[in-house]
Image (cartoon, rainbow, N blue to C red):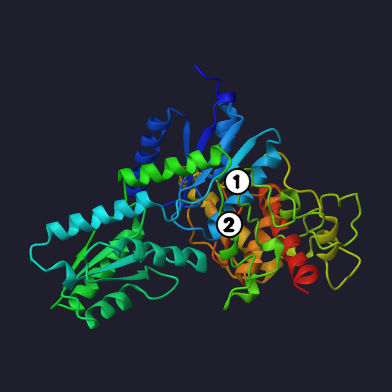
Amino acid sequence: MTHPSNQPALLLIGHGTDDPAGLEEYHRMAARVSERLKAFVQPCFLELADPSIAQAIDDCVRAGHRRIVALPLLLGAAGHQKNDIPVALNEARMRHPDLDIRYGAPLGVQYTLVRALAERVAAAYAAASASVPRDKTVLALIGRGSSDPDSNADVARMARLLWEGSGFGWIEYGFYSITRPNVADVIRHCVAVGAEQIIVVPYLLFTGRILQRMAAQVETARQRHPATSILMAEHLGLHDGVLAAILQRYDEALNGVAAVNCDLCKYRRVMPGFEDDYGRPQESDHHHGLRGIHHHGTSALDAILPPRYRNGRPVSAAPMSAAPLVYDDAGRVAWDRVWGGDDPNNPFCELALAGGPPHRGTLLEPVSPEAAAADPEGYARVIAELARGLHMVTGLPVVTACAPGWIGLVCESEAMALWLLRAIVVENVSVRREGCTLFLPAGPNFRLDGEIKNVVTAVAKTYHYWKEHVQG
């Protein structure tokens, strides 16, 4: 039997969902991949489900694996694939310097996925009770939607490939959210061009909340257009074409030919409407390639900040000692007065530049939903104190109604959220991002002078550095 250290583990990185059916379908696909490859496959998630990428990599290392193929189980190349996953992988490389992590490309537009969608469409058409000719039937391919034009363009490309040679009258494409056209727009246009029948094709890998909401949008459209037959095909799911697409990306990563087209990336090329996202290397790890060390001229370690935090300011080699807690007249921690400095009007300057000690020991991570539910009063106290402290040191809105184990901080822009995410990661504090919101760890056992202070400290110094030394 092959020793684990000689056999690569496959890290399947999903977006994440809190829908049990979606998680079950995802794990069934992971089991099929493992069976086909005869290899160890570790599912993990960006958000909403466990394990996280960091936890999954640590589990692989504990099992004896020294090589990991990390595959983003995403249909398009967008922010998660270009930014969030590389940050997590580089943080793992820092914890495990001898670990060989090979980063694969997202599934993208592959022939096997085109074939899978075509078979889903054929099944929906065959099951229709009314007999409408193909040339009077219009397809409507609906993707998830992204703020990244590269990812959205893949939906348009997939739509054209799906329609070519199909015999259907025409095809339109749209998106569930974030960008346009939306589901209602697409169906309204299909009706306007004379479609007697519309087949909505969900361009989604797995079932879950988004598929359910997309189905609700389609049902609303049926009520608005009762004279038109509107069908909905099955999502990609456990189709053999999805399995084949995953195996293809695994083979590419393992053999050193994994790549993403950087020429269509808004973080590298100036694209109309996205000028503000260009030219800030700190915003994109952008490690397209086998080992995740390519950064358009910047090394992987440079890409994840310090010293202090990569804008050339001279910094003392000796970090600040841990500052004692300062209390107000009501006996609460005065988070905005904990850190002193040379500038009496700006107490965070010395903290930001000298750094202060990062979180000690292992990565500070969120607790499990079960741990949060086991002590609701303690968890509520920690969330309230974190919310108070984060708002005091940043002035930013705080979101407390999050997935258990997390508290949200709403940044002023996506650029700010991306930069802060990288800076906080190197403080050994777990952090994830959804749009402009950063999510930081929480747990009922977090101590005021321990984990709570470490989270607030990491945010205080990185936020100050962004506002006063980077953004300016």
Left or right, 61 with respect to 295, comes to: left
Label of residue 365 in the image? 1
Q: Amino acid at mark 2?
A: Lys
- The residue lying at 20 percent from left, 79 percent from top is 224
| Front label number (1 vs 2) | 2
Q: Nearer the viewer, residue 375 or 45?
A: 45
Q: Position of residue 86 (x, y in %)?
A: 61, 50
Q: Which of pointers 1 and 2 lies earlier in the amino acid sequence?
A: 2
Q: Position of residue 29 (x, y in %)?
A: 36, 41
Q: CA distance from mark 1 to mark 2?
A: 23 Å
Q: Nearer the viewer, residue 101 or 122?
A: 122
Q: Nearer the viewer, residue 405 or 239?
A: 239
Q: Position of residue 389 (x, y in %)?
A: 67, 62
Would you name the residue on which mark 2 appears? 82
Q: Quadrant of residue 345?
A: bottom right
Q: Position of residue 305 (x, y in %)?
A: 75, 55
Label of residue 84 in the image? none
Answer above or below: position of 54 versus 160: above
- The residue lying at 59 percent from left, 25 percent from top is 5
Query: Circle 2 — which element?
Result: helix
Answer above or below: position of 205 versus 217: above
Query: Circle 1 — which element?
Result: loop
Q: Amino acid at mark 1?
A: Glu
